[in-house]
Image (spheres, rainbow, N blue to C red):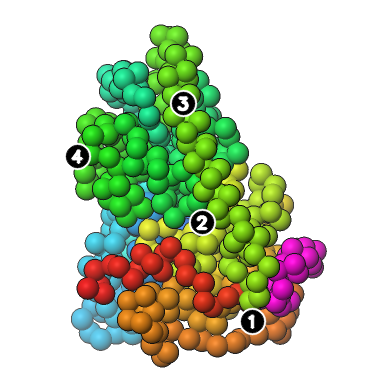
Amino acid sequence: MGTILGGQIAAQALINRGIEVIFTLSGGHITPIYQFLEDSPIQLFDTRHEQAAVFMAEAYGRMTRKPGVAMVTAGPGFTNALSAIANANQANSPLLLISGAVGVSCCEKWDLQDMQQAPVITPMVKKAFVCHTPSRIGEFIDMAYRAAGCGRPGPVYLELPVDVLNAQVEESKAKQFNTTLCSSHPVDIPKAAQIVEMMKAAKKPMVIAGSGAWYSDSSAELTAFADTCGIPIFTSSMGRGVISDTHPYCFESAVATRPGSVLFAQADADLVIFLGVRLSLYFMFGEIIDNNAKIIQIDVSPEELGRNRAVDLPVCSDARGLLTECNRLIDEQGAGDGLKTQYAGWVEQLRSMDTASKTMMQPTWESQDTPIHPLRLMNEIDKFMDRDDDIIVGDGGDTQIWMSMTRTVRQGGHYLDSGLYGCLGVGLPYAQSAKFLNPDKRVLCVIGDGSVGFNFMEFETSIRKGIPMVVVISNDLGWGMIRHSQHLRLGHNIKDGTEIGYVPYHKLVEALGGFGIQVEKPEDISSAIEKAFASGKTACVNVMTDPTTISPGSIALASIGAYK
């Protein structure tokens, strides 16, 4: 046998893994891998900024439930990826970031783009690997990919120095690994029986299903659980749509800003089952739940159980596997009808609260005001995007809040936003990735005029690559959430840093070769979106929204510790 380059080992390992696409921006330190991926089964999807590449990989991972792969070059390429990595870490998104690095032989010599990368990113990822042995590159790629997708998913970092990639290796020593991702569903069977017994003792229970429900692929099991015992279900994060918002026992988003019965439910429930979801800010760290309520928390990671609030029954288990066992027990015991009858009054109470809350909100959703009320814009988007498989991406401060208050999610993996990290700029890359994955589905990104500036040149990427996504900009002439929170806290906004002014974003997209249209009246929103989709191009709908409206997110931001 002859010799083989480290870069070829890396490329072959990625091909063997069945990777379909790598989101990337080229650079000298990763060219040794690029040269062996050219004309390979793997598509190199190049973006205009490393941040966008990693966001695209994150969205790919979220939607497919298998690690998305991004590849960046050393130094500034690496640092440009960090915000997106932090976002993926907070959201538990399966993601593998491969980064080039200065050669081992040139460390501390002030070589081009020299920096210590691994110590910077290690606290931000599930695991960080650095491979210094060329013959082990395939092994390291296998380990890193598996780490990103197994157990609780998350971002994983793999660093490959350029001289390791350029090194000659005897082909017989270049071992290739391709270990299958663990797909088992470990179940705590005794705890499942305890859950059923606690459900029998409850009068006012609720389930909050989060990302763990999505990543375990538990849609069928959760829907059966709701159908069998009539328990109210709320969803959060990537759990949105795991059970459709249109299901009679689904009460939509579990986040308190959502119009409906969620606030009342959390404050009055006597049993709260957290299914693959963390007791985070979204639930006021568990403080909103009645002190006398029993809490069950189910998570695949034992260290997450009991964070922020004592839990009566901590369960380390896969969400899908546990639901399967609970459904079996309920069926075996013939307990379903009894539970449904037991919870019926509670369910009707929640439905009444849900109707009353949305009735109060209806005049705002149907507002005729100009400039356009943001909730009217979101309502028009929600009504237009009415197919079960329509995909919506939300991005921004207030804009993301308004959309999350409105969107009807009918299918898992079809609503994306930044999540708890609140990272601006995810919108265009997420939508780009969603459309790349689902060319036959309608994909719409709704984004604030502040956020759209972060990765604006992804419009050019989409146009160049023929990806016809529709982007609706809620243009309130500035950084609305910060502007409003400053008004609430200080009595005025600080002009520098909160006001942008009018920008004809639709004209900029037209200049790049896309479709652009501006909307100033609420009655024109739907027709503009229709024209954008009909164009068959990457499209920008620039909607002039009211800069004076204050979202619940702005109110919350005015109260956080940083302002005290």
In primary-sequence order, the first of circles 4 and 1 is 4
Look at mark 3 in the image and give the residue it sits on: 345
Could you say which is closer to the camera, residue 434 or residue 542? 542
Residue farthest toward the bottom in the current orientation of the protein: 496
In percent of the image, x 25 and y 44: which residue is there? 304
Q: CA distance from mark 3 to mark 1?
A: 51 Å
Look at mark 1 in the image and give the residue it sits on: 505
Task: Inspect the image, locate mark 4, and give the three-letter code of the amino acid beneath it.
Answer: Ala
In primary-sequence order, the first of circles 4 and 2 is 4
List x then y, in percent, for residue 136: 32, 54
- In front: mark 3 or mark 4? 3
Secondary structure at badge 1 equals: helix
In primary-sequence order, the first of circles 3 and 1 is 3
Look at mark 2 in the image and give the residue it sits on: 404
Look at mark 4 in the image and give the residue it sits on: 310
In primary-sequence order, the first of circles 1 and 2 is 2
